[in-house]
Image: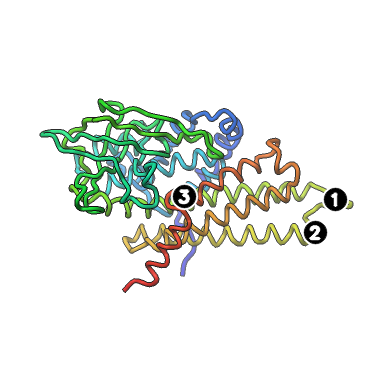
Amino acid sequence: MDFALTEEQQMVKEMAARFADAEIRPKAAELDETHAHPADIVKQLGELKMLGIAVPEEYGGGGMDYVSYVLALIEISKGCASTGVIMSVNNSLYCFPVYAYGTEDQKKKYLHPCASGEYLGCYGLTEAGAGSDPAGMRTIAVRDNAEWIISGEKKFITNGNVARFAVIAAVTDKEKGYKGISSFVVDLENTPGFKVGRVEEKMGILASGTAELIFEDARVPADALLGKEGEGFKQMLTTLNGGRIGIASQAIGIGRSVLEDAVSYAKTREQFGKPITSFQAIQWKLADMATELDAAELLTLRAAWLEDHKKPYEKEAAMAKMYASDAAMRASVEGVQILGGYGYSKEYPMERHMRDAKICQIYEGTNEIMRLVVAKNLTKG
């Protein structure tokens, strides 16, 4: 068993780390405080081919593998979790389904602009009454000659306030249940009847916009249909598997920042005439953090390797997302504890890490759903 990275993978990891340290980390606190979309950083990510890492170069991407994607996203998320999720959604939830299910014309028209970083994409699945259960979806699409008419509202859509393009799930046949869901790739800027609704006020990832997408008899061309009618649910499951690898990577990046900040602080903080790293209680907290984050990274790299090699990875992606997000949350709680009063203060980034970590247990499928996915795979057949 070979755990060594290829030369290209190591290069991508180091490039992402240098960029995060130089361009992202110094701005993270300000981005969190102002809730500002990191437009300049996102532009540079596009220039570095990090917004379409696994998309072939002919469609504007980096032409790399999913292991490289995980390595890069961990480093970017270490610098700023908000930037990490912007990158994750564009790669996993937008570029992946358009590349996997789009026609050649759709790839040229809708994939290239986002994989190259010219624009951002988003994924419209969640609704007020349809989160873990897509059967509750109420957004509908009705065929009208050479167009589809989309009506409904999507909720909690990452990048929704800044995206030019979106993959939208809608019901095209109510009688068929899950098999009546279809996907559409939509140019949000040129779709009459579409508007951005409320942009959420959130606990964390404050520089990442989370918005409502509102479709009121919005008309899109017939060729906006992604794949075939009724294939939306199947596409959704595959897309979310990849998305969970992205969120696992984001969580690991947050956890790595927690660990680095906790170790740095503990080395200089003295109590009873000694640095607190000399106390076993602190040592054990740091040891548990490091062990769990390493385990989470190995789980995530395994899932990415399976995706690269076209092998089933639904269970492994769910395991990685579940374990990594839980590990990041546990690390952030202990990180705040190690810093004490400073951990609770905005003077240090630790409280931001804790706020950012929490969402990783919720989006791309709650961790309760992840446990169901793992159990389903263990007991089927």
Residue annotated with mark 2: 279
Q: Residue at x 73, y 59 (%)?
A: 283
Residue reaching furthest to the bottom: 381
Residue at mark 3: 247
Verify CB contact (< 8 Å) between mark 2 and mark 1: yes
User: In the rendered image, is residue 107 in sight?
Assistant: yes
x then y, percent, for residue 235: 28, 51
Q: Amino acid at mark 3?
A: Ile
| Alpha-carbon span between mark 2 and mark 1 | 10 Å
Query: Are the two marked residues, 3 and 1, in contact with CB atoms closer than 8 angstroms?
Result: no
Instruction: Give the label on residue 84, or none.
Output: none
Query: Is 312 placed above or below 30 here?
Result: below
Answer left or right for 188 relative to 37: left
Q: Residues within 10 Å of mark 1 (few under 14, many from 20)?
A: few
Q: Is residue 259 left or right of residue 52?
A: right
Say whether residue 110 is left or right of residue 118.
left
**Three-letter amino acid code of the residue under disc 1:** Gln
346 in relation to 242, above or below: above
Q: Which quadrant would residue 150 be assigned to in this image?
A: top left
Q: Position of residue 318 (x, y in %)?
A: 43, 59
